[in-house]
Amino acid sequence: MINIEILRENKRKTDLNFIKRGCFFNHLFFYEFDSKIKYLKKKLYNLNRLSNIIATLIKVYRQFNLNYSFLLHEIAVIKVSSVNIKKKLYYLEVKFNNFLLTLPNFLHNSVNYGLSVDDNLEIRSFRASKFASAKIIYDRYLNDPEFNKNYIDFELSSNISGSGFVILKNEIASLHRAVCNYMIDLHVHKHGYKEVISPLCVNEKSMYNTGHFPKFYNDQFGLSDTNLWLIPTAEVVLANIFSNSIIIEDELPIKLVSKTECFRKEKGSYGSKVKGLIRQHQFDKVELVSIVKPCESYTLLEELLSHAELVLQNLDLSYRVLSLCSFDTGFTSSKTYDLEVWFPKRKLYVEVASCSNTETFQAYRMGAKYRKLCSSLDYTHILNGSGLAVGRVLLAIIENNVDNDGNILIPDVLVKYMNGCRVIKYK
């Protein structure tokens, strides 16, 4: 949620932000409700003060045995007025809060204005040492029924769960697990993240805290007859660990990593060139979340991005880094980088990670604060990033590491996680 003080005090910044995002900000609604709420709060405050004064007078009248029945009448009138004001205030605040929850985050000044994904800026790219040629790629998991049956079985999963799910088998299942373990080990042992094993279900309040509700309410899987929802990303759990908490400044930054199953109703699409594991209702993702001081957040965003990049560099996969334009920057984010891996068979880049700075947007919603050395309190900044999307990285490894005989060559960094196996032979 946006800090309401910014909306009140900086009309120009507010207007520019929503224009860049292509959103409409209802000034009339905002200022009308804001002024009504402030007026009623002031009126309620004055009634409470008056009630306290009268209560003091009643004590004096009692002490001198004076008739104070008229004061009791005034107290009763004030109580009725206060109850009515509280009812009006509750109604206005609920409606006003629901409006504020629909507003996207303020964009960082460095985010360029854009109207489509075509306006995203390529910051840099990395070319693998063995850049795969599309001529020798065997797109077997789409075209070979035997490969599908033995390794990546969409037909069987469809019979069991419907579309948008997959069953991995044998060496490909082992490779998937190896990718997960490699990512976690890299982030924990080299980059200093603390590993968390998190629940896959969260309550509604947690989804509101991270900005997934109400914006993406219809994209989520809920558990019927409960207040629980399947997580769309471990970010929901990792960020909410610090809900309604006060962190000592010296403890920052706090860096957490978690590998979870993620669940989303909307599979989306990259077009006809993308099938299978690229978009699923259920998928594995390694998530990075950092709780940081505002003055360090953009430096640490670059660091988090470099941690995600190192995964791809060590796997020797070609990729590019995009700085997202105003149109494409997510609802909760002030600035986002996307990592896209090259798929030579499809001849396109596919996103495997988004690394974002939400600044105080999530912290303000959930009440995540830190105590400065001078003892004052401030909201933290919260960073999040994929480290990475496991299924997509798995496919990138397959597509970029197939030899002329159709065998899948295991990247060097994964060999120890595959019990020394270096090749998945074409059967």
Image (cartoon, rainbow, N blue to C red):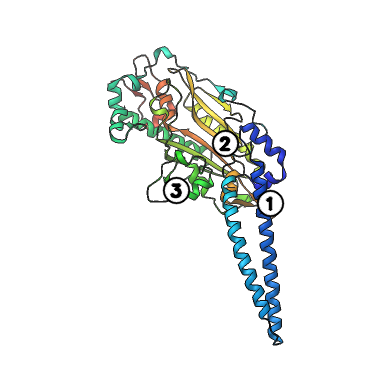
In the picture of the structure, the residue carrying the numbered disc 2 is 356
Where's residue 367, x and y in %?
58, 51
Q: Which residue is mark 1?
A: 35
Which numbered mark, 1 or 3, is in the foreground of this view? 1
Q: Is residue 243 visible?
A: yes
* Mark 1 residue crowding within 10 angstroms, few (<14) / some (14–19) / many (20+): few
- Mark 3 lies on residue: 202
385, 409: nearer the viewer: 385
Residue 398 horizontal/vertical position (percent): 39, 23
Q: Looking at the figure, which quarter contains the C terminus?
A: top left
Looking at the picture, how far across and down is residue 407, in whole percent? 34, 19
Element type where label 1 sits in the image: helix
Q: Amino acid at mark 2?
A: Ser
Asked whether 248 or 419 is in front, the reply is 248
Which residue type carries mark 1?
Answer: Ser
State the SS at label 2.
strand
Q: Disc 2 to disc 1, how far (Cα)?
A: 34 Å
Disc 3 secondary structure class? strand
Q: Quadrant of residue 25?
A: top right
22, 406: nearer the viewer: 22
* Mark 1–mark 3 distance (CA, rounded to whole Å): 35 Å
Mark nearer the N terminus (1 vs 3)? 1
Check disc 3 and give the amino acid type.
Answer: Val
Mark found first going from the N terminus, 3 or 2: 3
Residue located 66% across and 59% down the image: 41
